[in-house]
Image (cartoon, rainbow, N blue to C red):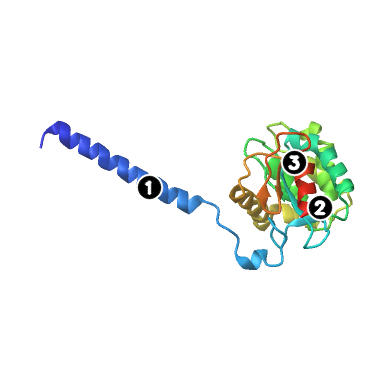
Amino acid sequence: MKTSTKAALISIAVVVVLAIAAVFVVLLTRPSAPPSAETEGALPGTRANSHVIDRAGEDAPTLVEYLDFECEACAAFHPVVQQLREHYDGRINYVVRYFPLAGHFNSMNAALAVEAAAQQDRFFEMHDKLFETQAQWGEQQVSAADTFRGYAEELGLDLAAYDAAVSDPATQARIEEDMNDGKLAGVRGTPTFVLDGKRLQLTQPTDLTDAIDSALAH
């Protein structure tokens, strides 16, 4: 066999091996669907432990917002969501799920702070506090964990319990559950809205309300 032919065959074999390896890596790292026990009784697009902020019942449309507390677009959208919740009060389920983006230095720290507060039934108080103060701690390359702990103190949280929750690996695992579910739902950025399990494509200002109105009409 000519040397050039042998080299070509070896190159092809290497490419095939690398392609097979890449497939296995994708299969091993791809997020998996949650076990049925974790979704039993949950609203569409949620888990049983998801943070349901507004509950209108199982027959009502369920709007899930995937967000990142360091995301400027999420902060800008926050008052819009507040108005939307008021407008549809009692008619839709509204759920918040975590999706901290890798490009934001404090996004995971912020999610940990909110989840730690949630364990003391103060989810939305910390949620609002972080959006209200985002300009003070966001887009920085130093940890804002102490700042968030200060907010916990301002909110009157049990700081020992807060510290324990922030440092508990289970708290971050809880956040990563949301992230994995978001990836399965096609979430790539924030904020992303999922209505009754279907990711919404928002291109016009009225797309979100139009989608909800359509869901309510059916």
Determine which residue is flagged by label 2: 123
Q: Residue at x 83, y 50 (%)?
A: 124
x and y percent of residue 104 in the render?
Answer: 67, 36
In this rendering, does residue 179 appear at all?
Answer: yes
Q: Residues within 10 Å of mark 1 (few under 14, many from 20)?
A: few
Above or below residue 72? Residue 200 is below
In this rendering, does residue 152 appear at all?
Answer: no
Determine which residue is flagged by label 1: 21
Q: Tell me the element at label 1.
A: helix
Determine which residue is flagged by label 3: 69
**In which quadrant will I find the N terminus?**
top left
| Kind of residue at disc 1 | Ala
Q: CA distance from mark 1 to mark 3?
A: 36 Å
N-terminal of the pair, mark 2 or mark 1, is 1
x and y percent of residue 161 in the render?
Answer: 79, 57
For the view shown, which residue lies furthest in the front direction?
218
Which mark is in front, 2 or 1?
A: 1
N-terminal of the pair, mark 3 or mark 2, is 3
For the view shown, which residue lies furthest in the left direction?
1
Q: Residue 147 has which mark?
A: none
| Kind of residue at disc 2 | Phe
Is residue 37 shown left or right of residue 81? left
Q: Residue at x 13, y 33 (%)?
A: 3
Q: Residue at x 80, y 47 (%)?
A: 213
Q: Residue at x 66, y 58 (%)?
A: 170
Q: CA distance from mark 2 to mark 1?
A: 42 Å
Q: CA distance from mark 3 to mark 2?
A: 13 Å
**In which quadrant will I find the C terminus?**
bottom right
x and y percent of residue 197 in the render?
Answer: 67, 53
60 or 21, which is in the foreground? 60
Q: Tell me the element at label 3.
A: loop
